Image (cartoon, helix red, strand yellow):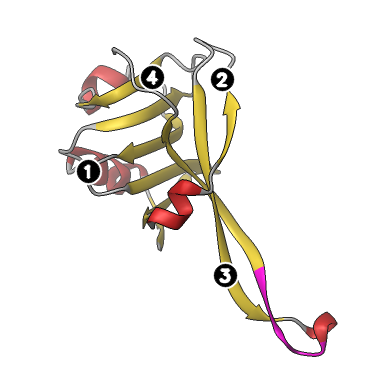
Amino acid sequence: MTNSIKTDKQLQQFYETLQEEYEGYIQMSDSPIEHIFRSASKLPSWSDLHNGINYILEMALFEPKSKKSILVRQTNDKWVVIEKVLTEDEINTTDSFYTLKDKLKAKIAQIWQEEKDEFCLGLKTLSPKTLLFAGFETGGQK
């Protein structure tokens, strides 16, 4: 799993390198979620998303072939970007919820990490680290 903090320009450069086809969504700052990709689809261009005053508020993508999940969240004047290739176990043990728009069933992978736990006599326990989008339960049309 890689985590990075990006400026607006760095996020644009990162976004423009995304050439695969993704499931997921992009929420812009000036509207409810309008960009939903139910099946593997090419992403809209950066200029098609931005109108000069808006920005990406949140983006969750999943590339089915490589099983790569990308989460982008806006924080103050920067963006947190988390990328991880999900294991079969992480994909097979996802939780899910129905989205408000279109009633899609989104799969969410819980990422856990083994750590020493001072409250368990220093033994290693699993601790939750993050939640990542792992696609929709069933594909559909864009």
| Nearer to us: label 1 or label 2 | 1
Taking the magenta stretch, the answer to whether it contains residue 118 is no
Quarter of the image for the N terminus: give it: bottom left
Q: Which of marks 4 and 3 is nearer the N terminus?
A: 4
CB-based contact (under 8 Å), mark 1 and mark 2:
no
Q: Give the mark toward the camera: 2 or 4.
A: 2
Quickly name the residue at label 4: 36
Q: Residue 133 carries which label?
A: none
How many residues crowd mark 3 within 10 Å: few (<14), some (14–19), many (20+)?
few
Residue position marked by numbered label 1 in the rendering: 65
Instruction: Please give the label number shown on residue 99.
Output: 2
The mark closer to the camera, 4 or 1, is: 1
Amino acid on which the number 1 mark rests in the picture: Lys
Task: Give the position of the C terminus as an image quadrant.
Answer: top left
The magenta stretch is: 121-126
Q: Residues within 10 Å of mark 2 (few under 14, many from 20)?
A: few
- Among the two numbered marks 4 and 1 on one chain, the one whose residue lies closer to the N terminus: 4
User: Under tag 2, what secondary structure?
Assistant: loop
Provide the residue designation for mark 3.
113
Give the Cα separation between the discs numbered 2 and 3: 28 Å
Q: Which of marks 2 and 3 is nearer the N terminus?
A: 2
Residue depicted at x 19% and y 26% = 42
Between the residue at mark 3 and the residue at mark 1, the CA separation in whole angstroms equals: 24 Å
In the image: residue 21, left or right of residue 54: left
Q: Tell me residue 60's x, y (percent).
A: 42, 36
Residue 117 lies, with reference to residue 66, above or below; the image says below
- Kindly identify the amino acid type of the residue bearing the numbered disc 3: Gln
Mark 3 or 1: in front is: 1
User: Label 1, label 2: how many angstroms apart (C-alpha)?
Assistant: 23 Å
